[in-house]
Every structure is written in C-alpha cells, then in structure tokens.
Amino acid sequence: MPLTVKELDALKPQEKPYRVLYEKGLYLEVKPSGAKSWVFRFTKADGSRTWMGLGGYPDLGAAKAALKAGKLRMGIAEGIDPLAAKREEKQKEEAVYTNTLRKVAEDWYQYKLPTWSAATAAKCRDYLDKDILPELGDRPITSIEPGDTAGLMKKIENRKAFNVAKKVRQWLRAIFSYAIAHGLIRHNPASELTSIAAKAPDAVHYPWLPDTLKSFVDEQVSQGSYGTNSEYVRELIRKDQDRLHLRGLLLAGAASAPAAPADPAYFEGLRDRVRKAAKDGVRG
C-alpha cells in the first residue's frame, strides 16, 4: 500500500539522503536539510538503471506524482527514454525565447544577402532597423500572431509610407516563411496582409521630365523596388544626401520641358549626374 499523506509528512531527515518507495518506480527522497522530492527509477534501453527527478514535495502531491510516473512507464513501454524526452522538451522551451523575430530576421537577412544588389540590401536593412525590429524584434517568433503584423502595417500606412508598407509586407512574409522552413513555426502570420492593405493614392506623374531623364527613371524603377516612377522621383528629392543639388537638376528639367527641346548633350549630362547621385546613395 502506498504511504498516506500523513506518513509522507512524518518522514524526518537523516544524516544522509534516503528514499522511500511510494509505488512501482516512484520514490520520495528526503535530504538532510529536510527537503523532500519525488524521484522515478527506471531501466534504460541498454539495461542500465537510472533516476529521474519529478518535482518537489508537497508542491507536487502524491497523486500527481503517481500520475506522472504512470505516464513515464507507458512511454518506456513504447521505447521512449524519459530523460531524452525531458531534454528535448527543455530545448524546445528555451528555443521559444532564443528564437526571437530579431534573431530569425538576422539569419534570414544573412541568408539572402549574397543574392541581393547593394541597393536592395541597404533598403532591407533600413526597413528592418526602422520599422520591423523596433516593433516586433524582441518577441519570440512563436508568439507573433496575424494581428501583430497587421498592427505594424497599420502604423506604417498611417505615415502614408505606402511603398515602405509594400516592401515590409513582402519581407515579413519571407522572414516567416524562412522560419517555417526551419521548423520554428507552423503558420505564417504575415501571409494575408495584402488582403487588408490600404490603397495607396493614385500616382502623381511627372510629364515635365525630359525624355532622357524619363528613360533613366524608368530604368531605375524596373531594376529596383519602386512601384511607380513618381515614387522614385519623390525618393530622389526627399533624400538628404545631395538634396539641393539633385532638386536643382530635376527643377531645371521641369523649367526647360515646356520650351523647345534643349541641347541633347545637356540632358545626357543631366542623366549622368542623376545616375551618379543614385549610385552614391541618394536612392538609399
């Protein structure tokens, strides 16, 4: 017969630790300090005998300890090593807090980096550091829900940064897909963001741009991540680097467009100067 609660409580400490059998394989260990805890003794697959701690007494009562021991015996009968299973469970719990969105995003970024142009890499780094990671970076990736990613997108759209929102949606989906492929999560909380994306205002075109500059802008848009020419032109004007100089170039094109065609050499030089500004980092 198993010991009663009264008998378990009455066990006194001795000079050395000792164990009292409660039921098959389940013992209550009493330490010289008086602390009591449940331990389970079982036979491993290689035939050796070993111990496994189940929890302290009386926090873990006798009935619950017996239930734990019974489940372990069932697992052993099916060939499961309870110590190995316990280690695996602990590793999974630790991974929940280790694999934050920040860590997974950094791993994904490094994985993608060799395939990107310098401009794409810089843009992604900028959006990670300014938009994605400050909001969600320190969260365990398993804890992030669709509502969290939708909230992030709402904040970006409220700034009227619709091009940023478009790229952030794309990159969030890619980061979570990367996590799924590595077995870190089961579902992508960014997979449906396009269905709730705010509609960007109609693009404002720039008919005053000279043809040579239009060609350059078209080329940059087709090679980059800008949805429209007007987004790219606004980006050129907005950037701090060489801001006044570049604005002057664009306004010069605007002033001359209504008049007769200017010297082709001038516009070719204008195209080269804008290209140089873009390569030097104006485009970001």
Image (cartoon, grey):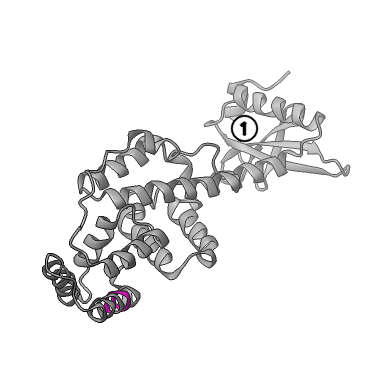
Residue 11 image-quadrant placement: top right
Q: What's the magenta bit mostly, secondary-structure-wise?
A: helix
Q: Position of residue 91 (x, y in %)?
A: 60, 48
Q: Residue at x 41, y 36 (%)?
A: 145
19 sits left or right of 264 in the view: right
- The answer to which of 113 and 247 lies nearer the viewer is 247
Highlighted magenta segment, given as a residue range = 273-277
Whether residue 41 appears in this view of the structure is: yes
Provide residue 6's location: percent of width, then percent of height: 58, 22
Residue at image point 63% right, 20% down: 4
177 w.r.t. 65: above or below: below
Name the residue at 73% across, 42% down.
51
- Residue situated in front as seen by the camera: 139 or 79: 139
Percent of width and height locating residue 105: 46, 55
**Residue 72 image position (x, y, % from top left):** 72, 31
Observer-nearest residue: 211 or 248? 211
Q: Magenta includes 275?
A: yes
Residue 60 as seen in the image, left or right of residue 166 = right
Task: Judge whether 281 appears above or below 99 on screen.
Answer: below
Looking at the picture, which amino acid does disc 1 mark? Leu
Asked if residue 11 lies in the magenta stretch, the reply is no
Q: Is 101 situated above or below 47?
A: below
The residue furthest top is 1
Residue 284, can we see it? no
Mark 1 highlights which residue?
Answer: 11
* Residue found 51% across the figure and 57% down from its top: 108
Location of residue 88 by image quarter: top right
